[in-house]
Amino acid sequence: MMAALSVNDANTGAVVVDHPRVVRGGTRRRKQLRHLLLPALHALQREAGWISPGGLNFVGRTLGVPPAEAYGVATFYEMFRTEAPAHELSVRHVCVDPICALAGAARLAENLRSQGHATHEGPCLGQCERAPAVFIQGRREPDRVPDDEHGPDSLLVSVTAGSPDAPSLLRHMLDAPAGSAEAASMEAYRARGGGDALEAALRLGPDEVISQISSSGLSGRGGAAFPTGIKWRAVADGDGPKHVVANIDESEPGTFKDRLLCERDPLAIIESITVAGLVVGAAQGWIYIRGEYPLATQRLRHAIAQARLEGWLGDDAAGSGRPFDIDLRRGAGAYICGEETALFNSLEGYRGEPRNKPPFPTTHGLFGRPTVVNNPETLLNVIEILRIGPEAYRSVGTEDSPGTKLFCLSGHVGRPGLYEAPFGTPLGELLSLAGGVQGTLSAVLLGGAAGSFVGSDALELPLSLEDTRSAGTTLGSGPVMVFNDSADMGSVIERLAKFFSDESCGQCVPCRVGTVRQHEIVTEIRRAGAPTGSQRLLLDDIAGAMGDASICGLGHTAASAVLSGMQLGLLGGDES
Amino acid sequence: MTSSNGSIGSQVTVSIDGQEVSVPEGQTILAACTAAGVETPTICWAPNLTPVNVCRVCVVEVEGSRTLVPACSRPAADGMQISTDSERVRHSRRMVLEFLGSANDLSQAAEIAEWSQHYGADAGRYAAALSDESETAVEIAHVDDPVRVQDDLYIRAYDRCVLCYKCVEACGDDAQHTFAIAVAGRGFDARIRTEYDVELPESACVYCGNCVAVCPTGALQFRTEFDLRAVGEWRPDDQEVTRTVCSYCGVGCNLELHTQDERIVKVTSPADHSVTSGHLCIKGRFGWQYVHAPAFEPPATESAAADSTET
């Protein structure tokens, strides 16, 4: 814990600044040590198997957090228990979301249980390409994923890797086997051009870098597609201490790209965060990675250590004359913490409840300071822009969606895996690239649980931001979940509805109650076989209120998969 | 740190349902609505608390905004075109009220009931849409939590709790800085809790009762009111409110004594009172029993004198 205290070093500008409160969860009541609450709870959970009252009180006293609030935080996360377990075992988390369910997750969980393992069925674990997924939360041993040790290598494919003048995030990862030391070695990373982007950024200066990003047309890859140049510009123009956050809390069912990026090219992630920090003038960078990614976490930590040795991080970061360092924080199982403002609250040691926007992170972000928060795929794109220039970057993709997109293919396709293809690639072409649909296509879920279903008539759909938007669907963070006619689509949709009622933070009424009512109605529709008129009306009414009046994107999108599934007739009855 | 609400004298003008209204810069849309004479439903907002904007019943439509906007917390900005009675606004307000009505016991939330009627909220239609002739139909979830009567000062009935966060704010940053309670759990199962749900005397609670004073649904209730309701004798219309100054210390907190049948049944403080902002301590809030103590009868001085001379 001592190392993490360095973020409060007076030389680097205080991280925690007291200022007037804007809204709850906003900018007041910042305590110096509270951001260590999440790591402390992780430590308690690992050692004791639960968050005991004694442990919680000790942590609360040490960090200056009232016990009731610390308890509120501990009970927010899937990975923390606040009741003593009746065993001394590590816990096996089994994913029961649609792709893993199709691949036999229920049977797997049953088997694990009958073998005497402590087993917990929960939401997506981000390993959809090798479903069904298991993650072992260690009791007095490190967390681990069995497939990281003896599973097959995940498949990576890039359409653009062949031409050096085109952007390709996966180019270097294709050569290096997953388990090799290559990925984590600074020497190998430098030998293949690692560090060039950082040097280029320092040579060009912040204004030029931001203007190149703007003219490249880069937009955020986490799902919201906000223009990256505008975000960086706003934070660069802000005053006082600032932050850069890599949002690696990918928890959208069907998404596993960030895990693979961090496992296979961790130094590139660190380099890109450093570029962001030096360009916008932040002294502190943060990685918030989901707790279910032990291998990626380990590699990123190693990469941070290497970057410090290399001089990229420290009081004179990369020879810039300015300080910059990176801290890593693990999430603890909460889909909502991928929402940027919920992530800030979680990182600061509060419940991961989204904040109302405005104010936006560019002015009131982490610790109430101007903050750049980006998806790692977005950050790696910045490296590619600095490598080949904005014009070459725009040579692939469409006019309104330049560059490439990473697609996570899972379900009934020949070769599930991570695919990089230019924006605008038709859905059917992407599916062919992945070995085609197994059997007869029933539906494709684009964008994950927060996305929507499309049918076999959508194979021509170009996968660009503008085309999916005008078709009434979304790319989201890039999940493409494929279901053939053997899949029980009613069960898939019911599970998606359950996912949202489980993952709603509970803060605002439309989402807290709406997601529960939606799940109840879908369950009843499945039981009865087809929706009634009043049930359709209710689902529409609920969707309207959640979409219009919820605080954050989770609520806004919580009805779209259900509604699109119903429109395709996947819930029985006539297509509406 | 630049702050827009520190400047003196600058006004912003917004349009509310076509009517122009000016308010000081930094004021919320809700304040602008009030200034324009437009009534706005609120549940989680209170004049003496920082807006938490979680209930979403005050949402309005602001031109140029993709989603609806919470009036209670969004600062009014010059030129805003605001609709408070559009179809979208009425739909979301009605749904929020319906959602709460379907999940909670709102029988003691008079203001919410009035707004529910105003917006035509029909909380019963969820259960109705799920039930058919078969007995296997899915049942709708309610917030269930048995009433906690643990002491003489106040009770907690969390089946009435709509999770407006007011009690948490009053216990914490906005008034008392005791932090005895917080929201625990997640989603529909989120509840107001002390750590590990320990009983109040074991928690940090100092019984200031500020949480009770801000509760909009009767989930937190003074024991006096709870007991009177139990026997059907709680009659707010028959109550008198007398303003006075607390007699305990020299701070000068103003009290409002609510009396029914010449007995104190509740003590509050005006939210706009400069000393209290509506918040009190345990003495001012609960220490009024002496008023009803049997009248003090001084010892008969003659006999007392006689006693002393005899010894």
Image (tube, rainbow, N blue to C red):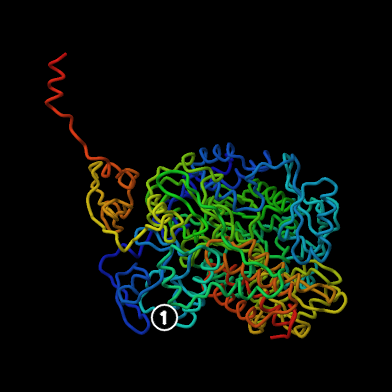
Local SS, label 1: strand
Q: Position of residue B302 (x, y in %)?
A: 11, 26
Taking B203 as reference, is A436 left or right? right
Let me know if residue A139 appears in the view. yes
Vertical placement of B192 versus A540: above or below?
above
Q: Position of residue A266 (x, y in %)?
A: 70, 55
Vertical placement of B112 versus A298: above or below?
below
User: Dot 1 falls on which chain?
Assistant: B
Say which quadrant the N terminus of chain B sits in.
bottom left
The quadrant in which residue B53 appears is bottom left
Instruction: Out of A44 and A306, give the one closest to the viewer.
Output: A44
Vertical placement of A52 versus A319: above or below?
above
Let me know if residue A193 appears in the view. no
Q: Going 62% across and 50% down the picture, which residue do you hit?
A: A328
Taking A375 as reference, is B57 left or right? left
Residue neighbourhood size for the residue with mark 1, other residues' Cα within 10 Å, grouped as few (<14), some (14–19), many (≥20): many
Count of number-bearing discs? 1
Vertical placement of A256 versus A392: above or below?
above
Q: Position of residue B169 (x, y in %)?
A: 43, 54
Q: Going 13% across and 20% down the picture, which residue do you hit?
A: B306
Mark 1 sits on what residue? Answer: B83
The quadrant in which residue A480 appears is bottom right
Q: Position of residue A185 (x, y in %)?
A: 75, 50
Q: Amino acid at mark 1?
A: Ser
Taking A191 as reference, is B196 left or right? left
